[in-house]
Image: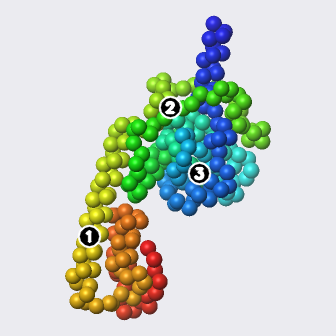
Amino acid sequence: MHVENRKSTQEHSDAATFPKACRLVSADFTRVFAVRQRASNEWFLVYARKNDRFRARLGLSVSRKVGNATIRNRWKRRIREAFRIVQWKIPTGMDYVVVPRGTTIPSASQAQASLMTLAGKIVLSIGAGARSKLNHSEIVQPPRDPDPLACAGVHASDNIEHRTVPLCEKQDGDAVLPVDFQATKKGWAVLNSLLSEVLIRGVRLYQITLSPIIGRQCRFQPTCSHYFIGSVQKYGPVWGMMRGLQRICRCHPWNRGGSDPP
């Protein structure tokens, strides 16, 4: 009986470890921030970027504005503990940088739910904007480390207590993204692609037909039509169209114009 309990405890500990392979280094932070894919709520601002690995990785950016050293360490411990538990429930193959917000530290359950929700929103945004090829065949199972205690990767300075974290009742480690989530993501990607194509074709038709008749009137470089196309391609149909219309409204005789890339 004692041997069986030890075996069960070891399996639970293995599923909730936080090895060094899951931690971002300085260069990784720069790459994540450069992509500018993010989502936020009242507790966290999460940045994310796709990586070439089979698992999710975490980085923390806790500024002095959050509070004193004690408060900052509490935030770090809460975020790390939440990531350990949900690291195989959020989309894998991603680098996440979590920035604390506000003054109230969320509870353990709130932190876990926030990470799962914000990670899902970012993956949905990446799939819609860049026509991501992520599909159900890319879902991987969490690997079993040969020695979970040796690869825990927790430094003594982190002041983190080693505890056994039980798995959820229905958790089996086989799924990272639910099927309905995949279908919704693909549907949004197709819809965004169609809307973008319609808007771009409409502007190109204007460039071929009306623009030669009207003549060059734009005060900006690139022109408003090229800016509109670039915005739709970069930001998607909705936000790109709004930015394009804002540029057109600013193109008037009282505006000096100049270089204004999308």
Look at the picture and state if 22 lies above or below 144.
Answer: below
> Which residue is under mark 2?
141
Mark found first going from the N terminus, 2 or 1: 2
> Which residue is under mark 1?
201
Q: Hey, which quadrant is residue 20 in on the image?
A: top right
> Which residue is under mark 3?
97
Q: Hey, which quadrant is residue 139 in on the image?
A: top left
Q: Are marks 2 and 3 in contact (CB under 8 Å)?
A: no
Where is the C terminus found, in terms of image quarters?
bottom left
Identity of the residue furthest to the top in this view = 1
Identity of the residue furthest to the bottom in this view = 253
Q: Which one is nearer the viewer's eye here, 100 or 139?
A: 139
- In the drawing, what numbered circle is on residue 235? none
Query: In the image, 222: left or right of 203?
Result: right
Identity of the amino acid at label 1?
Answer: Arg
Q: Residue at x 36, y 77 (%)?
A: 226
**Is disc 1 placed on a helix, strand or loop?**
helix
Question: Where residue 206 sits: x, y (%)?
Answer: 25, 78
What distance separates the C-alpha of mark 1 from that of mark 3?
37 Å
